Image (cartoon, helix red, strand yellow):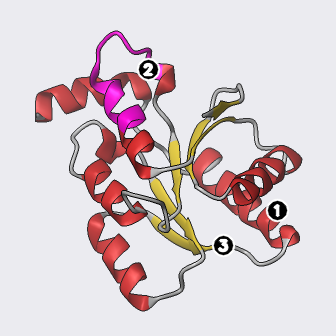
Amino acid sequence: MNDTRSDFHILLIEDTRADAQIIERALCEGDVSHRLTVIPDGRHALDYLFSMRDESVPTDREPDLILLDLNLPGIDGCQVLKRIKNDPLLRMIPVVILTTSNREEDILQTYQAGANTYIPKPAEYSSYRELVATLRNYWVDTALKVPRHLRRTLSTNAG
């Protein structure tokens, strides 16, 4: 697990180290103030996310955005997404599918499971930089999200 510091916390669930490094580089070069946590598989991602139910875990461990690859070893990205969106605490965290798959079945299945956005991975690095700029413009500068400190209160009342 890799962790860099800032206020906007991005959880990247990506098993391909080169892709994770490209995304991290694009985030840094794209001037996105962020803290990035990279987890390489579905099982560890779910362990990390579900550990936030523990009241002793600081709320700053909770991501503001999840970037999720579908093609993960073991528990695949769609299964991870379903578990996230079926949990009262986690369902409030936006999930962006970032994958190589352009299959209509994957697109349909992930939107049905609650994905907020589905984006194919770019083929060229310059396109990653454009993608990061788009993510920043929407998820950091435009969209209003449930503040971290309210998520636990709301999920406790819902669960």
Q: Amino acid at mark 3?
A: Lys
Find the magenta span and give its range: 47-59
In which quadrant of the rendered view does residue 45 lie? top left
Count of marks, rendered view:
3
The image shows residue 37 at horizontal and vertical percentages of 61, 36
Foreground of the two, 14 or 136: 14
Mark 2 lies on residue: 59
Secondary structure beneath dot 3 equals: loop
Q: Amino acid at mark 2?
A: Thr
Quadrant of the frame with the C terminus = top left
- Residue at 38 percent of width and 45 percent of height: 43
Q: Main secondary structure of the magenta part?
A: helix
Foreground of the two, 110 or 33: 110
The image shows residue 146 at horizontal and vertical percentages of 39, 37
Label ID, residue 121: 3
Quadrant of the frame with the N terminus = top right
In which quadrant of the rendered view does residue 47 lie? top left
Q: Is residue 34 left or right of residue 53?
A: right
Point out the residue furthest to the bottom here: 104
Q: Nearer the viewer, mark 3 or mark 1?
A: 3
Secondary structure beneath dot 1 equals: helix
User: How dense is the environment of label 2, judged by Cα within 10 Å: few (below 14), some, or many (20 and up)?
Assistant: some
Q: In terms of sequence position, does the residue under pointer 2 or pointer 1 come before the other?
A: 2
- Spatial CA distance of label 2 from label 3 is 30 Å
- Spatial CA distance of label 2 from label 1 is 29 Å
